[in-house]
């Protein structure tokens, strides 16, 4: 193989490497960084769009499957945020969330499956594999929509915690009456 034939695989391999690294680390609460929240879903969206673009042109049925996969992925991603544990550090006002390893490994598997099917079709002359490529593209669209929806919903929930913290921090303390500790006046 030469570099020209490997060049379309570089970005998906980098994304897969980042995902494997994330999945293998101990899953402890990580700070929600609002500026970085969009980085990974954007990279995954680019990989997905390039993958779908390089595949065979979808017909009506495959296009419908793509739309259904994206809607379901968005719903699962939105719901998945409800399984995350969010916490707020009262002193610093920083939000943390704990995630699972399964989602990252699922994405790596789908990317590998998609590029494996593409390799089989192009290099081994398997023309009847278009249905398999449509299926893997649908799964890839599902997972991408899931990550995008997860980022959006994480941003909404984490932002609500930060706003609530700032609001409570800006409220003036009630004047002490001396009765809080059982003292009588």
Image (cartoon, rainbow, N blue to C red):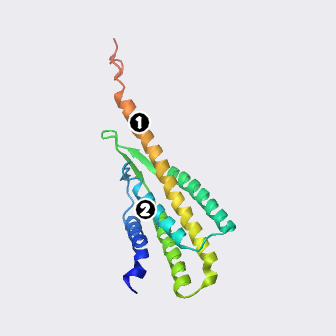
The residue lying at 40 percent from left, 80 percent from top is 4
Which mark lies nearer to you, 1 or 2?
2
Circle 1: element type: helix
The residue lying at 57 percent from left, 69 percent from top is 137
Q: Earlier in the sequence, mark 1 or mark 2?
A: 2
Q: Is residue 153 above or below residue 112?
A: above
Task: Please indicate whether residue 32 sits to the left or right of residue 81 in the image.
Answer: left
From the top left corner, tell me how far across and down residue 61 is, in percent: 69, 67
**Which quadrant would the C terminus be assigned to in this image?**
top left
From the top left corner, tell me how far across and down residue 117 is, in percent: 54, 79
Quadrant housing residue 26: bottom left
Dot 2 surroundings within 10 Å: few (below 14), some, or many (20 or more)?
Answer: some
Would you name the residue on which mark 1 appears? 163
Q: Is residue 113 above or below residue 76?
A: below
Q: Is residue 31 above or below residue 162?
A: below
From the top left corner, tell me how far across and down residue 59 is, in percent: 66, 69
Q: Nearer the viewer, residue 70 or 166?
A: 70
The residue lying at 53 percent from left, 69 percent from top is 53
Q: What residue occupies the far top of the structure in this picture?
A: 185
Would you name the residue on which mark 2 appears? 43
Task: Please indicate whether residue 171 sits to the left or right of residue 127 in the image.
Answer: left
Task: Please indicate whether residue 33 sits to the left or right of residue 153 in the image.
Answer: left
Task: Please indicate whether residue 53 sits to the left or right of residue 12 in the image.
Answer: right
From the top left corner, tell me how far across and down residue 24 is, in percent: 39, 68
The residue lying at 43 percent from left, 71 percent from top is 12
**Which quadrant would the N terminus be assigned to in this image?**
bottom left
Q: What is the spatial separation of the Cα atoms under label 1 and label 2, in whole angstroms?
A: 28 Å
Q: Nearer the viewer, residue 84 or 148?
A: 148
């Amino acid at each position: 193989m030469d570099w020209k034939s490997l060049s379309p695989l570089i970005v998906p391999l980098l994304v897969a490497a980042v995902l494997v690294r994330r999945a293998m680390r101990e899953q402890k609460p990580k700070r929600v960084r609002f500026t970085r929240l969009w980085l990974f879903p954007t990279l995954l969206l680019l990989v997905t769009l390039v993958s779908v673009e390089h595949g065979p042109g979808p017909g009506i049925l495959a296009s419908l499957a793509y739309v259904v996969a994206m809607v379901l992925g968005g719903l699962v991603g939105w719901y998945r945020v409800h399984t995350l544990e969010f916490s707020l550090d009262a002193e610093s006002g920083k939000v943390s969330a704990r995630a699972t390893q399964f989602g990252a490994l699922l994405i790596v598997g789908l990317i590998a499956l998609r590029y494996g099917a593409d390799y089989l079709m192009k290099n081994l002359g398997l023309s009847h594999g278009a249905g398999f490529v449509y299926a893997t593209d649908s799964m890839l669209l599902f997972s991408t929509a899931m990550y995008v929806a997860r980022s959006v919903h994480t941003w909404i929930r984490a932002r609500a915690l930060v706003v609530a913290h700032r609001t409570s921090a800006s409220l003036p303390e009630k004047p002490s009456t001396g009765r809080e500790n059982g003292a009588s006046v």
